[in-house]
Amino acid sequence: MSAAREYGLDEQYEWARPPAGGWTADDLDKLPNLPPHTELIDGSLVFMSPQTDFHMATLRLLENALLDLAPEDLHVVREMTTKLARQDRPEPDLMVVPQNARTGPRQTWYDPDDILLAVEIVAADSVERDREVKPRKYARAGIRHFWRVEDDDGLPVVYVYELDPATRTYVDTGIYHKQLKVDLPFPLDIDLTAVNRRGQQPG
C-alpha cells in the first residue's frame, strides 16, 4: 500500500518535496495542497494533528477573554503565522498585535516586531516544540510576551513569560492554575475554570 492511499489520498497525490537547504518562510504561501495550519520550523514543514476538545475549549476561552479585555488599539489574531526568520514561520494559537499591523484581507502572516503577545496551547505531539523550540525562537525574534498553556486534568495552566531584552531570552513571571491575573501586556483577569462553561464572561 502506498503512503498516499494509507492516508486516504489519491494515488496521484504529490507530497511536497523540499528543495536543497529546506523550505523558506515565503514558500509557505505558494506550496499547493498543504494541510491547514502547516508550520515551518528550521526549514521543515510541520503538520498539525487533529485538534482536541481541550485545545478548542481553551483557545475559545482565551480568545474571547483577550477580545473583551484588550485595548481598542490592539487586535487579537487566531491561528495565523509569523515570519521569525528565513526558515521559520510558526503559527501561534493566538497573537495580540497593534491594529495598524493589519495590512488587508489577504494578509497571511505578522512580523514579530508587531507581536505583543504569542500564545501556544501544548498538544501531545507539540510538547518539545511548544516548551523548547518555539519559545527560544520567539524570544530571539523579540516577541515581548509569551504564554504556554498546558492541560492539567482538563483545566488550563498558563505559564507566563516576559522577554529580557538584554539576553533575548524569556523570564518566567508566573504560573496560573485557576485564575490568570496579570498587568502585562495589558490588565487581564481570566477565570481559567470557566473553560468548559458556555457563555462564561471573563473576569
Image (cartoon, rainbow, N blue to C red):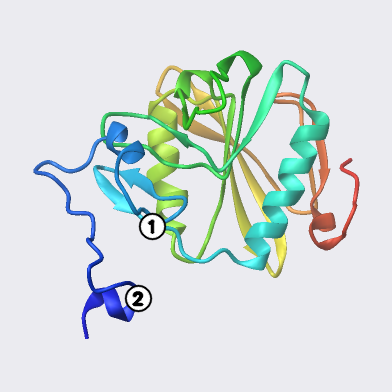
Left or right: residue 86 compared with residue 119: left
Q: Is residue 70 above or below residue 59?
A: above
At 26% from the left edge and 29% from the top edge, which residue is drawn?
Answer: 86
Q: Position of residue 26 (x, y in %)?
A: 30, 31
Q: What amino acid is at disc 1?
A: Phe
Circle 2 crowding by C-alpha within 10 Å: few under 14, some 14–19, many from 20 = few
Q: Which residue is denoted by mark 2 in the rendering?
A: 7
Q: Position of residue 59 (x, y in %)?
A: 67, 50
Q: Is residue 8 above or below residue 105?
A: below
Cα gap from disc 1 to disc 2, whole angstroms: 14 Å
Circle 1 crowding by C-alpha within 10 Å: few under 14, some 14–19, many from 20 = few
- Helix, strand or loop at label 2? It is loop
Q: What amino acid is at disc 2?
A: Tyr
Q: Which circle's residue, 1 or 2, is located before the other in the chain?
A: 2
At 72% from the left edge and 42% from the top edge, which residue is drawn?
Answer: 63
Q: Which of the two residues, 92 or 36, is positioned nearer the viewer here?
A: 36
Where, quadrant-wise, is the C terminus in this rendering?
Answer: top right
Q: Position of residue 197 (x, y in %)?
A: 87, 60
Left or right: residue 202 compared with residue 2: right
Q: Position of residue 139 (x, y in %)?
A: 44, 30
Q: Which residue is denoted by mark 1 in the rendering?
A: 47
Q: Which of the two residues, 15 or 91, is positioned nearer the viewer here?
A: 15
Identify the mark at residue 26; answer none if there is no mark: none
At 38% from the left edge and 57% from the top edge, which residue is drawn?
Answer: 47
Q: Quadrant of residue 8?
A: bottom left
Q: Quadrant of residue 51?
A: bottom right
